[in-house]
Image (spheres, rainbow, N blue to C red):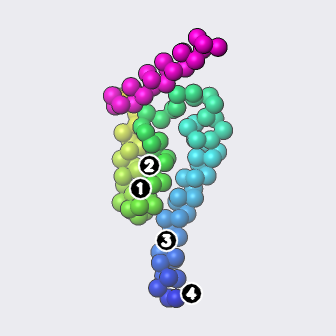
Amino acid sequence: MRPRNLLQHIMGLPRNLIVLMITGYQHTLSPDHGPLKHLYTYGYCRHSPTCSQYAKEQIQNRGLFIGGLLAIKRILSCNPFTKPSDARIREIIAKTSDFTDHRKTV
């Protein structure tokens, strides 16, 4: 391995470790991605993509510092006092109407 490639791998370790931890969270504890997904048929997160997926993408693309700050901003915007976006409300309504239409035909 060339010294430059070795240095890039060493510098990327914290980023890759955080992304691995987020992936572990998604596969175990996340109500939108993990084994609890069946409990929330319409999804739990008000954002699309979910906060964990957004954090993972931003950290991979922008780095640990900037991506981490954007992820924290996104997570802090997800609270019961924040109004969900109109697009998310339309998406939930569409899923609900699809579900009720399916129930009527069965």
Report x, y in % for residue 68.
41, 56
* 98, 62: nearer the viewer: 98
- Position of residue 12 relative to residue 106, above or below, is below
Crowd around label 4: few <14 · some 14–19 · many ≥20 (10 Å):
few
**What is the number of the mark on residue 1?**
4
Precedes in sequence: disc 3 or disc 1: 3
Determine the residue positioned at 52% across, 28% down.
42
Span shown in magenta: 85-106
Q: Give the labeled residue for mark 1.
A: 58
Cα separation between marks 3 and 4: 15 Å
Q: Give the labeled residue for mark 2.
A: 54
Q: Give the labeled residue for mark 3.
A: 12
Considering every residue shown, the one lying at the far top of the view is 104
**In terms of secondary structure, where does tag 3 sit?**
helix
Question: Which amino acid is tagged 2?
Answer: Tyr
**In terms of secondary structure, where does tag 2 sit?**
helix
Cα separation between marks 2 and 4: 32 Å
Position of 92 with respect to 101 (left or right) is left
